Image: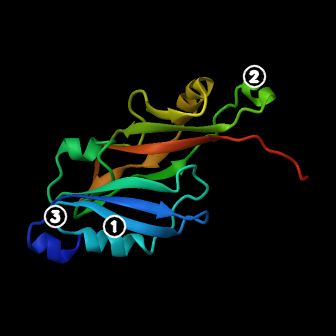
Amino acid sequence: MEYPDEAVNRAAQGDVKVQLCVDEAGVPTKIKVLADGPRLGAYVTKTLQDWTFAAGGDEPCSERTFRFRLKPSQADLEACDGGPLVTPGYEPPKKVKSVPPKYPEALARSGQEGDVILLVHLDEDGDPAGEAELVSAAHKDLVAPARSAIKQWRWEPATLRGTPVRACLPARLEFHLRRGPD
């Protein structure tokens, strides 16, 4: 999402919070603006209508906050809970390497499946910095292998006006058993 020129010209910044509902294919079916500090709700709604999201989630509707900042602070760059950052000259990190987590044998034998969502802090090189924070896990025994795998993931670093910066982002690690044809 780009920072609209008209918003930059009027020095508009703040948060736009939306409720976003998607169908099974990840296509938005409903976008409702819940809060619009910088008066950019219509822009966010129009932009999201053209996006496709991850499909198959348990929750078809979720809330998302887009943080519009003209001059982001270090805290804005490293925030994990504030939603996507939109600022002129900012490029978010891009994943370049992922390693699948090791499936715990006991859970595999019992057929336990699910996802783990972690918040990953990245340094200026795009490497994980510190312990990833747990957001949710389908089973407590999936957390340690998810954290172990995420330490091996790598990203191109986030940049602000071409300079690498620290960042934070959510990562979903899937634990799903592969089944043969029926």
Observer able to see residue 129: yes
Residue in view at x 38 percent, y 59 percent: 19
Q: Earlier in the sequence, mark 2 or mark 3?
A: 3
Q: Position of residue 130 (x, y in %)?
A: 39, 28
Which three-letter amino acid code belongs to the residue tagged 3? Answer: Pro
Q: Residue at x 28, y 42 (%)?
A: 78
Residue under circle 3?
38
Q: How many marks?
A: 3
**According to the image, label 2 marks what residue?**
106
In the figure, residue 38 lies in which quadrant? Answer: bottom left
Quarter of the image with the N terminus in it: bottom left
Sequence-earlier tag: 2 or 1: 1
- Judged from the image, the secondary structure of the residue bearing numbered disc 3 is loop
Q: Residues within 10 Å of mark 1 (few under 14, many from 20)?
A: few
16 on left or right of 147: left
Q: Amino acid at mark 2?
A: Ala
Instruction: State whether residue 171 is above or below residue 38.
Output: above
Q: Position of residue 77 (x, y in %)?
A: 26, 47
For the view shown, which residue lies furthest in the left direction? 10
